[in-house]
Image (spheres, rainbow, N blue to C red):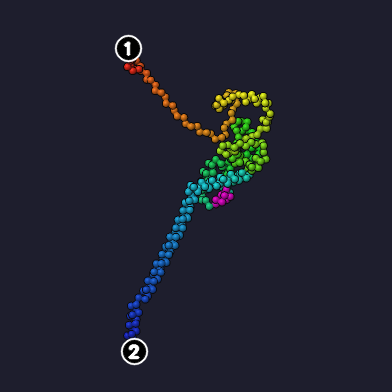
Amino acid sequence: MDPALLRERELFKKRALSTPAVEKRQAASESHKKKKSKLDKESSSGSKHGAESSNGNINIKTSSGYKFGCLAKIVNYMKTRHQNGDTHCLTLEEILDETKLLDIGMKQKQWLMTEALVNNPKIIVRDGTYGFKPKYNLKDKKALLRLLDKHDQLGLGGVLLDDVEEGLPNSAKAIKVLGDQLIFVTRPDKKKILFYNDKHCQFTVDEEFQKLWRSVPVDSIDEEKIDEYLKKQGISSMQETGPKKVLPVQKRKKQGQRKRQFKTHNNHLAGVLEDYSEGVPVKK
């Protein structure tokens, strides 16, 4: 083989070895690896941020506001189903299923079972089941009439319509059926009160008695004296059902300055000493 060609071949090999073509490719691959590692880090940070946000949601669910919101939703649901006639008790799982609160944790369930529902005044607990507890547990319209009649006989006044609607299933229908057996009175705060309409008390009073009744003046007698007179006669006055008025605070009157009294200890010098308690005596 021609020695000149061999020399050119050796020079070509040296130049090929000296050129950084392969090294540049490695650098490019390394940069690609760095970019990939950056993307992996960003994706991992994003997933970490997503995990943190999910943990944030869990923290919100474990907060007191979320817990009491669940409790309020349960109590309102139990009240609504009681008003619709579903008065039987439910287990906690059934309540959570019907209120769609299946995503709460075990701590919240434990809190509901041991504290929230047990201590709530509107919830009754029976053998591990829960039901609604109204102020007046009325089964039907007859129970409502008995309650109003009892209040009328004892002089307790009427019953709030809100309490009746809370405790009587399908109260609107029952009140409509009773009709004129009930009397509605609207308070100044727009709340309605139900009274029993005792038809035995509906009689005609002679005009002579009406004139005698109207001739007795009571303008000068305040309510306290009237109440005291009724008590002496063995009659209990009906308690006020309306909102109580707050009496203004009366200012204490300033008492006049009292004269100081001095004790006299020198009684044996009564004819010698002079009394200066009223000031210097005027010389006559």
Residue 123 spot, x, y in % from top left: 56, 42
Gap between marks 1 and 2 measured at Cα: 169 Å
Can residue 147 be seen from the camera position used here?
no
Q: Residue furthest left?
A: 272
Q: Which mark is residue 55?
A: none
> Is residue 269 found left or right of 239 in the rendered image?
left
Q: Residue furthest front?
A: 284
Q: Magenta segment range?
A: 95-102
Is residue 278 part of the magenta span, yes or no?
no
Can residue 184 be seen from the camera position used here?
yes
Label 2: state its secondary structure: loop
* Residue wearing tag 2: 2
* Residue wearing tag 1: 284
Residue 52 drawn above or below residue 122 = below
Label 1: state its secondary structure: loop
Residue 183 spot, x, y in % from top left: 64, 36
Q: Residue at x 31, y 13 (%)?
A: 283
Q: Residue at x 32, y 17 (%)?
A: 280
Residue 32 spot, x, y in % from top left: 41, 69
